[in-house]
Image (tube, rainbow, N blue to C red):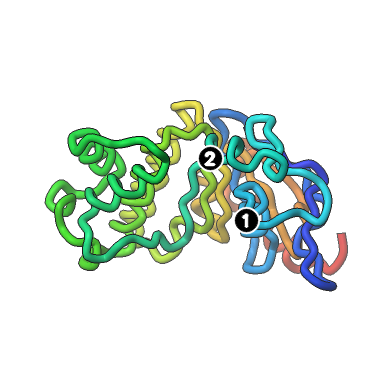
C-alpha cells in the first residue's frame, strides 16, 4: 500500500533522508522509531506530497505521489502530532466541515458514530473544541481520518503529550484499523508504544533506516537495547 524506493531528500547541503527503501502492506502497522531529526517526519511528508524528493520515489497503492498527487492522496489519511481544529466549533461541527472538503457530506448521525468510535465522550460531541484536552482533539482528528475511509493512514507522533489512558485508547484504535485491512505508517520516538502496536519497527537515525525488526519476535528489552546501540554508534 505504501512504498518508498531509494527515497532521498536534501535541504541545501543537508541530506534529511538517505535512499530510503520501505514498504507497508495492507493490515500492517509499521512504526518508524527514532529521535528528532531522524528523518521520520520527512518520510511522512514525502508520502503526503508535502516535500518533493531529491531523488527516488514514493508510491501510494502503486500511484507515484509526485506525478499523480491528487490520485495518491485519495488513498491517504493523515493525523499530525497536533490536530488543528476550529476552536469555536464543536467536535461534531469540525468533523462535518473537514469531511465536506473531500466533496462528500456526512450525516450528523454518522458523524456522531465516528466520534464515539474514536473514543470521544458523548457529552463532548456538541461542546466547543476550545475546551477539549489534547487527547480529545486527537480523537476528533482520528474521526476525520476514519471518515475518509482511506486505505493508508500516516501518523506523525500522534501520542505525543497524551496521558496513558488516551495513549492506550489510541493503540486500540490502531489495532482496529489494522484488522480492517488499512496500512498504517507511524512516526514515533516512543519505544514502548512502538512495541505495543507495531507489526514491524524500523529504527532511524540521521536520515538512515538502520534496521527493521519483527515486533512479535522482539521483546521490549531487546528492542530498547538495539535502539540504544544504534543511537550510540557513530557509523553504520
Side of 160 relative to 46 (left or right): left
Q: Residue 106: x, y in percent?
A: 28, 36
Residue in front for this viewpoint, 226 or 167: 167
Q: Residue 91: x, y in percent?
A: 24, 53
| Residue 27 to residue 122: above or below | above
Q: Quadrant of residue 65?
A: top right
Q: Quadrant of the N terminus?
A: top right
Residue 76 is labelled as: 2
Q: Residues within 10 Å of mark 2 (few under 14, many from 20)?
A: many
Residue extending furthest toward the front: 103
Residue 50 is labelled as: 1
Q: Residue at x 77, y 68 (%)?
A: 11
Residue in front for this viewpoint, 94 or 3: 94
Q: Residue 220: x, y in percent?
A: 57, 50
Side of 219 relative to 157 (left or right): right
Side of 188 relative to 16 (left or right): left
The reply to whether residue 225 is visible in this rendering is: no
| Residue 210 to residue 11: above or below | above
| Residue 154 to residue 28: above or below | below
Q: Quadrant of residue 234?
A: bottom right
Q: Residue at x 72, y 41 (%)?
A: 67
The reply to whether residue 210 is visible in this rendering is: yes
Comes first in the chain, label 1 or label 2: 1
Residue 145 is labelled as: none
Side of 108 relative to 80 (left or right): left
Amino acid at each position: 500500500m505504501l512504498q518508498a524506493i531509494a527515497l532521498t531528500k536534501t535541504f541545501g547541503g543537508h541530506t534529511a533522508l538517505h535512499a530510503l527503501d520501505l514498504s507497508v502492506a495492507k493490515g500492517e502497522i509499521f512504526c518508524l522509531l527514532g529521535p528528532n531529526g531522524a528523518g521520520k517526519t520527512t518520510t511522512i511528508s514525502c508520502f503526503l506530497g508535502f516535500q518533493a524528493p531529491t531523488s527516488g520515489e514514493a508510491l501510494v497503492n502503486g500511484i507515484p505521489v509526485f506525478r499523480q498527487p491528487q490520485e495518491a492522496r485519495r488513498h491517504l489519511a493523515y493525523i499530525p502530532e497536533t490536530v488543528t481544529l476550529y476552536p469555536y466549533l464543536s467536535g461534531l461541527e469540525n468533523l462535518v466541515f473537514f469531511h465536506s472538503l473531500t466533496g462528500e457530506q456526512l450525516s450528523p448521525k454518522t458523524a456522531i458514530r465516528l466520534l464515539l468510535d474514536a473514543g470521544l465522550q458523548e457529552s463532548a460531541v456538541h461542546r466547543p473544541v476550545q475546551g477539549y484536552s489534547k487527547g480529545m482533539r486527537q480523537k476528533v482528528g482520528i474521526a476525520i481520518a476514519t471518515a475518509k475511509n482511506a486505505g493508508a493512514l500516516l501518523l506523525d507522533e500522534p501520542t505525543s503529550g497524551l496521558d496513558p489512558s488516551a495513549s492506550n485508547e489510541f493503540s486500540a484504535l490502531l489495532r482496529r484499523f489494522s484488522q480492517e485491512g488499512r496500512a498504517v505508517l507511524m512516526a514515533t520516538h516512543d519505544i514502548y508504544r512502538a512495541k505495543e502496536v507495531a507489526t514491524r519497527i524500523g529504527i532511524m537515525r540521521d536520515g538512515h533506516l538502520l534496521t527493521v525488526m519483527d515486533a512479535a519476535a522482539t521483546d521490549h528489552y531487546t528492542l530498547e537495547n538495539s535502539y540504544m546501540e544504534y543511537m550510540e554508534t557513530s557509523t553504520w
